[in-house]
Image (cartoon, helix red, strand yellow):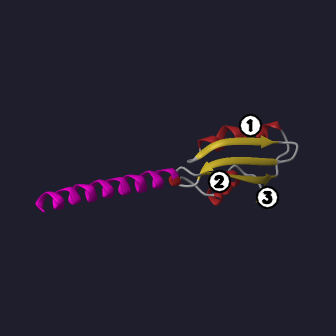
Amino acid sequence: MKTLIQVLKKAFMAIAIILFTTAAFAQKKEAKKVETVVFNVEMDCQECVNKIEKNIPFEKGVKDLKVDLKSKKVTVSYKTNATTKENLKKALEKLDFKVTKEKK
């Protein structure tokens, strides 16, 4: 009987460890979520593009940046656990650009 109880305790502990480990990995995976936002930015020249390309990649959480002067769009991919769309918009506005979020 004692042996059966010990075996059950060990089995329970093993299952508990597996469940906690799985939950921890699931949280890490969720924390690394990357989203993309497109902003309409009033820019007139290549200097505007250069200014954005020089500054925005260094904002916290930014993973990728595409600036299209012809369509006047700035596309930013970012980690959701590090920044927000609003913070990215503010960063562009801080560079003296008028910014609106593209509607989908």
Q: CA distance from mark 3 to mark 1?
A: 21 Å
Side (left or right) of 81 relative to 8? right
- Sequence-wise first label, 3 or 1: 1
Label 1, residues with CA under 10 Å away: few <14, some 14-19, many ≥20:
few
Q: Label 3 sits on what residue type?
A: Glu
- Residue 88: image tag: 2
Name the outermost residue toward the front.
Answer: 1
Q: Nearer the viewer, residue 89 or 44?
A: 89
> x%, y% of residue 104?
80, 60
Tag nearer the camera, 1 or 2: 2
Side (left or right) of 45 relative to 99? right
Q: Label 2 sits on what residue type?
A: Leu
Q: Which residue bears the numbered disc 3?
A: 102
| Membership of 75 in magenta stretch | no
Label 3, residues with CA under 10 Å away: few <14, some 14-19, many ≥20:
few
Q: Nearer the viewer, residue 52 or 18?
A: 18
Q: CA distance from mark 1 to mark 2?
A: 17 Å
Q: Label 1 sits on what residue type?
A: Asn
Q: Which range is magenta? A: 1-29
- Sequence-wise first label, 1 or 2: 1
* Quadrant the N terminus occupies: bottom left
- Helix, strand or loop at label 1? It is helix
- Helix, strand or loop at label 2? It is helix
> x%, y% of residue 76?
69, 47
Q: Which residue bears the numbered disc 1?
A: 50
| Membership of 11 in magenta stretch | yes
> x%, y% of residue 10?
22, 55
Q: Answer whether labels 1 and 2 touch (C-beta < 8 Å).
A: no
